[in-house]
Image (cartoon, helix red, strand yellow):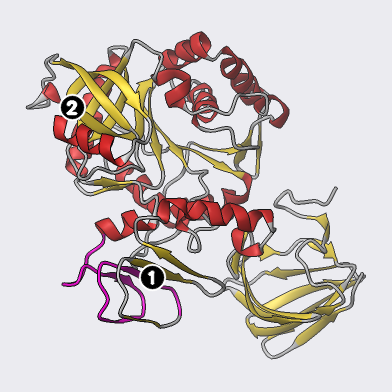
Amino acid sequence: MIIPIILAGGSGKRLWPLSRANFPKQIIPFDNKKKTLFQDTVLRLKKSERINSAPIVLCNNSQRFFIQEQLEAINVCAESIILEPCSKNTAPAIATAAHKAFQIAEDPILLIIPSDHYIQNINAFYEAIAIGEFYADAGYMTTLGSIPSNPATSFGYIKKGEALFNHIPFIKDSGQAALISSFIEKPDSASAKKYIKSGNYLWNLGIFMFKASIIKEELNKFVPQIYYFAFKAVEKGYYDLGFFRIDKDLYSQCPNISIDYAVMEKTDKGAVVTLDSVWNDIGTWDNMWRFAKKDENGNATNGDALLMDVKKSYIHSTRRLIAAYGVEDIIAVETSDAVLIAKRGASDNIKNIVDRMGALKREETFFHKKVYRPWGMYEIIDSGEKFLVKKIVVNPNFALSLQQHNHRAEHWVIVKGEAIVTRGEEEFSIKENESAYIPARVIHSLKNLQKTPLEIIEIQSGEYIGEDDIIRFEDKYGRITK
């Protein structure tokens, strides 16, 4: 049995401002697609008869409801959604997944795959998986590599060693596999050009296949601290609203290290299978431009864009018109609360300005104006000194927590649907074109018991308007204020 392990906890800083810490790239639909990168990954795996249709998904706490909703939208039920209490890189994450997989099947083959990759040739992907399964079953720790299409410096590389020519009955050309000679971290441009010219290097895709027993053995051999603390964290884990929470105190003692550094660069069991397909990890705006459909001037656009005398640029609009004139080699990305302007070729360094914004505690680092919550979403319409206006959508049969604000009052106006309001000791219903006023320091809540979404306009007013001005007393989503 192949059990897919989907790594879905990344932040995607290099795709800011579209991607934010609490709304990362894997759950954003790109290029006017209705499905997200995460959903594409899940469906790609589901269509293979060799792979278990119920994946194990790893994500962080802030992303858990996004992941659950996206799985439900494509009618997929996860075997388990594991919540990482802190970011510790891929080695501890894979260690916890391996331990969890043993609870599902006896020594399954694990397929470790990121949630944000674009793979053009699906049949080639399935063939690579079949070859990887063959060698994983034979005890190899297999990874997938892609033939480089350009001397990229934003990807790691794998140098192929001796070819593996074991006969695989269901594969015409089983010579796609080789032993791993070495891993190379992101190279400089000159080195990358040499790698491509030699024909003996592949891009490191971060997709792995190995038996659960093999990865446990290798972890125990090379990084016993991860072996011990990750597995103990799972043993002390528990289910909460359908999510599996691992023990934070134990997991936090794992070293912060990738599976490549921790195991793959040290093991003598490493093998690489060539994926014969166009591949991209959609990690930067430069990659978005490189793989996008372009006009005769080399420009790629998304959304409402008007270009004159523009060349080799990427323009991405989410709401407003972007008009560009007389520029070349630029990246321009617009959202409702931020605009990015960068030189094409330098987008790998956008994470530096995101880190700077994070240090300044700018909300644009973490959230969009449209913010998703377990119960639905809200969008900031307007704000100013001592006031803020939101549009709030509460999903059917969901509720806001029982809460209190010390510094602000709230006025709710129903636009569509019917709400059950708790205000102090009162409980009452308000319908379309009706409203309720919630004074500061009054405990309150709101429920949508209808079969359709509830839409309201919320007007906040007070000396301090901030999301941290909240005390939760009851919350079905586990967000009680301590």
Q: Which residues are magenta?
A: 292-319
| Image-based side of 348 in relation to 451, left or right | left
Q: Which residue is mark 1?
A: 316
- Residue most toward the left? 172
| Mark identifier at residue 200 | 2
Of marks 1 and 2, the one in the foreground: 2
Under mark 1, the amino acid is His
- Image x and y of residue 295, in percent: 19, 71
- Image x and y of residue 199, in percent: 15, 31
- Give the main secondary structure of the magenta stretch: loop
Which element type, helix, strand or loop, lies under badge 2?
loop
Quadrant hosting residue 376: bottom right
The residue at 8%/26% (across/down) is: 173
| Image-based side of 188 in relation to 175, left or right | right
Q: Quadrant of the N terminus?
A: top left
Which element type, helix, strand or loop, lies under badge 1?
strand
- Relative to 331, say whether 56 is above or below: above
Quadrant hosting residue 88: top right
How many circles with numbers are drawn on the protein?
A: 2
The tag earlier along the polypeptide, 1 or 2, is: 2
**Residue neighbourhood size for the residue with mark 2, other residues' Cα within 10 Å, grouped as few (<14), some (14–19), many (≥20):** few
The residue at 19%/36% (across/down) is: 196
